[in-house]
Image: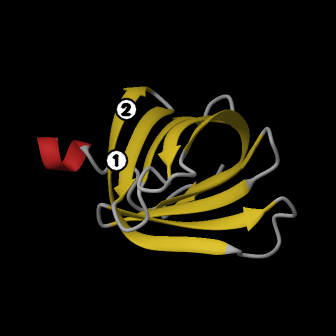
Amino acid sequence: MNQNESMHLLDGKTIDYTYDGGWRFRVRFYDGLAAYEFLGASGENVSNRNADIPYRSRLIREDLYHVVWHETNIGDLVSLVIDIANRRIYSAALLGYRGEDHHLHFEGGSVHSYAGSADAT
């Protein structure tokens, strides 16, 4: 596996998760890009989304990934640790850093599903 292939380890995967505070997201990885939908607290209605965001990932150990992306258009820098084996996710994100109302999101959550082209969990 070359350096570029190792950066996009989650291509073809979709993860659905809810942070402990109640926010639910669905993230899809494809062609070295990420797309997400913010499903709010109910998990039923898409209230925000973004797509075609370049991402990088690394395998820490089997079923444990570190993922990072930078949404330059809105000023968000997102870092996720995805623990598939324990069905947990952890976020450290600087949100809205261009504006005065920027804040740090640092929260864990539960993974509802993790699926890909050849498998589903």
Residue nearer the viewer, 82 or 47: 47
Q: Helix, strand or loop at disc 2?
A: strand
Point out residue 119 in the picture as x, y percentages from the top left corner: 55, 55
Image point (71%, 74%), residue name: 47
Q: Amino acid at mark 1?
A: Leu
Q: Quadrant of residue 84?
A: top right
Image point (79%, 38%), residue name: 20
Q: Amino acid at mark 2?
A: Leu
The mark that comes first in sequence, 1 or 2, is 1
Image quarter (top left, top right, bottom left or bottom right) of the N terminus: top left
Farthest residue to the top: give it.
61
Image point (66%, 33%), residue name: 107
Point out residue 108 in the picture as x, y percentages from the top left corner: 68, 33
Point out residue 29 in the picture as x, y percentages from the top left corner: 43, 61
Q: Which mark is residue 59?
A: 2
Q: Are the two marked residues, 1 and 2, in contact with CB atoms closer than 8 angstroms?
A: yes
In screen coordinates, is 9 left or right of 23?
left
**Residue 97 in sight here:** yes
Residue nearer the viewer, 108 or 76: 76
Give the spatial CA distance, label 1 vs label 2: 8 Å
Above or below, 97 against 42 in this view is: above
Image point (45%, 35%), residue name: 65
Please give the residue where the numbered disc 1 appears in the rendered image.
Answer: 9
In screen coordinates, is 9 left or right of 12?
left
